[in-house]
C-alpha cells in the first residue's frame, strides 16, 4: 500500500467506548490518506484526539492540499472533524452517501456545506488518478448511512466499522478474534443479514487488505480468518462447542448453584464451560460468550415478583442484538414465591429459534440434595 498512508490515532485514555464498553487496552481511530494526482482523506477521528489527528494529517500532506474527504460512517468517533478539515482546506469536497449528507446538520449545525458535498451511491466511482475508489453501500452495518469503498489499484477494502475491534494499535496482540468478537456482537451483532449482504459483495472483489476504522489492517491469512469468522458470526451460528452459565445472585445461593452446575457440566464431558457473574463480570464479554457457544444456562434469583435486574438486563441485551439459534437451560431461585423462571422463559421465548431444555430447576434459597439431582439432569440434557 505504497500510496496509502495511515494517519489515525490511538486513544489510551478512554475508559468506556460509546459510554458502555470497557476498553482497558484503549481504542484506535483509524484514518488513511491516499496520495495520487488527487488526494483523498479516508475518514477523520474522534474529537478526543483531534489535535493529534490533525498533526498527523498535516505531516502526511507535506504541504499538499487534499481534494476529497471521504466519510464512510457519520458516527462521531470517525467524523467529528469533518468541519475542521473543510474549513482548513476550502477547496476540498466531502464525499459521502445521501443518508450521511442528511445527517450533517445534526452534527455540524451552522456549517455551510453548500457546494462542498459529493453524494455517492452503490456502484459509483471516484478517480484519484491511477487509483479509483469504488463505493459499496453497507446500510445498517451498523448505521443506515454507512458505505465502504474498494480501491482497485492497491486492492484495499475500506470497511468502515466492519472488521473493527476494541484496543489501541499500540497494544495490539496476535489474538485479533478475542476483542473483535466482543466488538462485533455488541456493536454490529443485531445486523447479521446486512453483514451477510456486504460479505457477498466483498466476495466478488480481489481484496488484499482490509482497512477498518478500528483495529489493525488485515492482510493474508489474518484477513481470510477474519472473513471466515464474520461469516459465522453474521449467520448467528455457534463458533465453538461449549456451555455458558450466566447467573444473577443476591445472597450467594444462586451463585453456588451455578458454580455447581458448571462442575457437573465438566464432569459430564462438556468441552468448554464458562461461568459468569452478571453482577460483576463485563456484560459485553458475557454477551460475546453467549453468541460464541450453542448452549446457555441462565440462573437467577427472583426479585420484586420478577427476576433480579442484572439478568433482565442481560436477556434484554440478547433480545436487541437479535440473539437466536441457541439452547437454553433455566435455573430459578426464590425463598417464598419463585418468579425468575417465568420471566426468563418469557424473554427467551421472544427470541428466534431458541429452545428451552427441561428440566427447569427451582431452588428455594439454598441448594439441597434434591436440587443437585435436578441440576444433574439439566447438565445431561444440555449436553445431548
Image (cartoon, helix red, strand yellow):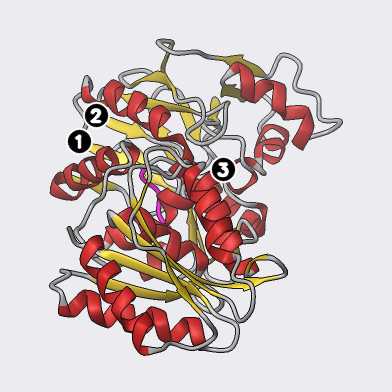
With 211 as the anchor, is 105 left or right in this view? right
Q: Is residue 109 visible?
A: yes
Cα separation between marks 3 and 2: 21 Å
Please name the residue shown 61% across and 24% down the image.
Answer: 94
User: 218 or 340, which lies in front?
Assistant: 340
Dominant secondary structure of the magenta stretch? loop
The answer to whether residue 116 is above or below residue 338 is above
User: 331 or 185, which lies in front?
Assistant: 331
Please state the horizontal and vertical placement of residue 115, each as a whole percent of the image: 71, 14
Please state the horizontal and vertical placement of residue 44, each as a whole percent of the image: 56, 43
Residue wearing tag 3: 44
Residue wearing tag 1: 208
In terms of image quadrants, where is residue 236?
top left
Residue wearing tag 2: 155
Are the residues flagged by discs 1 and 2 in contact, CB closer than 8 Å?
A: yes
Cα separation between marks 3 and 1: 23 Å
Q: Residue furthest right?
A: 110
Q: Magenta part of the protein: which range?
A: 163-167
Amino acid at each position: 500500500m505504497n500510496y496509502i498512508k495511515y494517519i489515525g490515532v490511538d486513544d489510551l485514555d478512554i475508559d468506556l467506548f460509546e459510554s458502555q464498553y470497557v476498553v482497558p487496552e484503549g481504542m484506535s481511530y483509524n484514518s488513511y490518506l491516499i496520495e495520487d494526482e488527487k488526494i483523498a482523506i479516508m475518514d477523520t477521528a474522534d474529537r478526543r484526539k483531534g489535535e493529534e489527528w490533525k498533526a498527523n494529517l498535516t505531516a502526511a500532506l507535506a504541504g499538499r492540499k487534499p481534494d476529497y474527504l471521504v466519510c464512510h460512517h457519520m458516527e462521531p468517533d470517525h467524523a467529528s472533524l469533518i468541519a475542521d478539515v473543510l474549513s482548513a482546506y476550502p477547496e476540498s469536497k466531502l464525499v459521502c452517501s445521501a443518508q450521511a449528507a442528511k445527517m450533517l446538520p445534526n452534527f455540524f449545525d451552522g456549517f455551510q456545506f453548500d457546494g462542498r458535498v459529493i453524494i455517492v451511491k452503490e456502484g459509483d466511482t471516484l478517480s484519484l488518478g491511477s487509483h479509483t475508489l469504488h463505493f459499496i453501500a453497507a446500510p445498517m452495518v451498523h448505521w443506515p448511512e454507512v458505505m465502504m469503498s474498494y480501491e482497485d489499484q492497491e486492492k484495499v477494502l475500506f470497511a468502515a466499522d466492519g472488521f473493527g475491534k476494541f484496543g489501541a494499535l499500540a497494544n495490539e496482540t496476535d489474538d485479533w478474534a478475542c476483542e473483535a468478537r466482543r466488538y462485533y456482537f455488541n456493536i454490529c451483532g443485531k445486523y447479521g443479514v446486512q453483514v451477510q449482504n456486504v460479505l457477498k459483495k466483498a466476495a466478488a472483489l480481489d481484496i488484499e487488505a482490509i482497512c477498518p476504522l478500528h483495529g489493525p489492517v488485515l492482510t493474508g491469512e489474518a484477513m481470510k480468518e477474519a472473513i471466515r469468522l464474520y461469516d459465522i458470526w453474521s449467520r448467528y451460528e455457534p463458533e465453538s462447542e461449549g456451555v455458558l452459565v450466566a447467573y444473577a445472585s443476591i445472597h450467594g445461593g444462586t451463585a453456588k448453584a451455578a458454580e455447581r452446575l458448571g462442575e457437573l457440566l465438566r464432569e459430564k464431558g462438556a468441552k468448554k464451560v464458562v461461568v459468569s457473574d452478571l453482577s460483576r463480570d463485563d456484560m459485553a464479554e458475557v454477551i460475546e460468550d453467549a453468541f460464541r457457544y450453542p448452549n446457555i444456562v441462565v440462573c437467577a434469583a427472583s426479585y420484586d415478583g420478577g427476576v433480579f435486574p442484572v439478568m433482565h438486563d442481560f436477556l434484554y441485551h440478547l433480545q436487541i442484538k437479535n440473539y437466536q439459534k441457541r439452547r437454553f437451560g433455566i435455573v430459578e431461585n426464590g425463598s417464598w414465591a419463585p418468579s425468575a423462571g417465568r420471566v426468563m422463559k418469557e424473554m427467551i421465548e421472544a427470541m428466534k429459534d431458541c429452545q428451552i431444555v427441561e428440566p427447569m430447576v427451582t431452588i428455594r434459597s439454598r441448594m439441597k440434595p434434591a436440587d443437585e439431582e435436578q441440576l444433574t439432569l439439566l447438565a445431561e440434557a444440555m449436553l445431548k
